[in-house]
């Protein structure tokens, strides 16, 4: 009888959970979002610092911080929906009636700067997540379909051509790749769940910081 305590069940059941694929989608999205955030940060800092000694520089800087807070709330909502955690209740800046008070709260609120920190580190993390997850997925899928490729395209054997060697596989050896591909697929799903937990903690610590 299979139970949830069975190591084999725990290892393979990850493929049957909806949350696993939502985590996977989120991690693949972090790459384009990380690039976008990096461009926004570089542009915003360049304009704000370059015009710092002019009156317009102060307005650009303030607008940049407002944009950062807006993006952080949107990203937090996205992460909450895909990663499956509850959104915190914020004290919105819009609740302040006085414009100067709203600007002061924006500049002095630590959440503004933790949001900037999150957007900055999301760039290298997005590259890491995307590279590892995408590469492992493509490898696992390639290994899984290797017996089919062997049969359809080469009756005598399957050639694996790399920069270092050429490896000719017969059908029996391609079946071993199939087993390895299935194992790698489950490893990829577990790794994506681990990365998703890291992202959830980062979002809660930096974007949802009160």
Image (cartoon, rainbow, N blue to C red):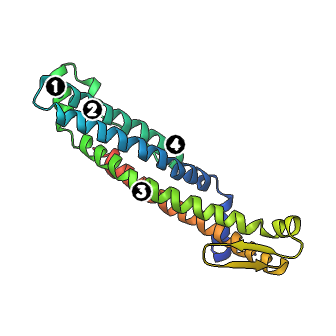
Of the residues under marks 2 and 1, which one precedes in the sequence?
2
Q: Residues within 10 Å of mark 1 (few under 14, many from 20)?
A: few
Cα distance, mark 4 to mark 2?
A: 26 Å
| Residue 62 visible here | yes
SS type, badge 1? helix
Which residue is at 85% across, 65% downward? 153
Q: Quadrant of the C terminus?
A: top left
Cα distance, mark 2 to mark 1?
A: 17 Å
Tag 3 and tag 1, C-beta contact below 8 Å: no
Tag 3 and tag 4, C-beta contact below 8 Å: no
User: Is 190 rendered above or below residue 61?
Assistant: below
Q: Is residue 134 left or right of residue 181?
A: left
Q: Is residue 13 left or right of residue 71?
A: right
Of the residues under marks 4 and 2, which one precedes in the sequence?
2
User: Is 159 rendered above or below residue 197?
Assistant: below
Residue hosting label 4: 81
Tag nearer the camera, 4 or 2: 2
Tag nearer the camera, 2 or 1: 2
SS type, badge 4? helix
Residue hosting label 2: 64
Of the residues under marks 3 and 4, which one precedes in the sequence?
4
Whole-percent x, y for residue 44 in the image: 28, 35
Residue hosting label 1: 101
Tag nearer the camera, 3 or 4: 3
Residue hosting label 3: 125
């Amino acid at each position: 009888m299979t139970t949830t305590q069975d190591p084999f069940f725990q290892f393979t059941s990850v493929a049957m959970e909806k949350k696993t694929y939502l985590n996977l989608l989120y991690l693949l999205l972090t790459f384009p979002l990380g690039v976008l955030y990096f461009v926004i940060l570089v542009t915003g800092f360049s304009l704000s610092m370059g015009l710092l000694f002019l009156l317009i520089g102060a307005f650009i800087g303030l607008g940049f911080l407002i944009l950062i807070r807006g993006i952080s709330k949107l990203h937090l909502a996205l992460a909450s929906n895909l990663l499956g955690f509850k959104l915190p209740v914020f004290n919105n800046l819009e609740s302040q009636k006085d414009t100067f008070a709203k600007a002061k709260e924006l500049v002095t609120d630590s959440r503004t700067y933790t949001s900037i920190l999150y957007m900055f580190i999301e760039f290298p993390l997005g590259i890491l997540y995307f590279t590892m997850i995408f590469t492992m997925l493509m490898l696992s899928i390639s290994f899984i379909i290797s017996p089919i490729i062997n049969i359809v395209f080469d009756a005598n054997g399957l050639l694996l051509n790399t920069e270092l060697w050429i490896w000719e596989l017969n059908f029996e050896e391609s079946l071993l790749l199939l087993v390895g591909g299935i194992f790698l697929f489950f490893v990829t799903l577990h790794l994506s769940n681990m990365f998703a937990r890291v992202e959830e903690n980062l979002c809660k610590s930096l974007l949802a910081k009160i």
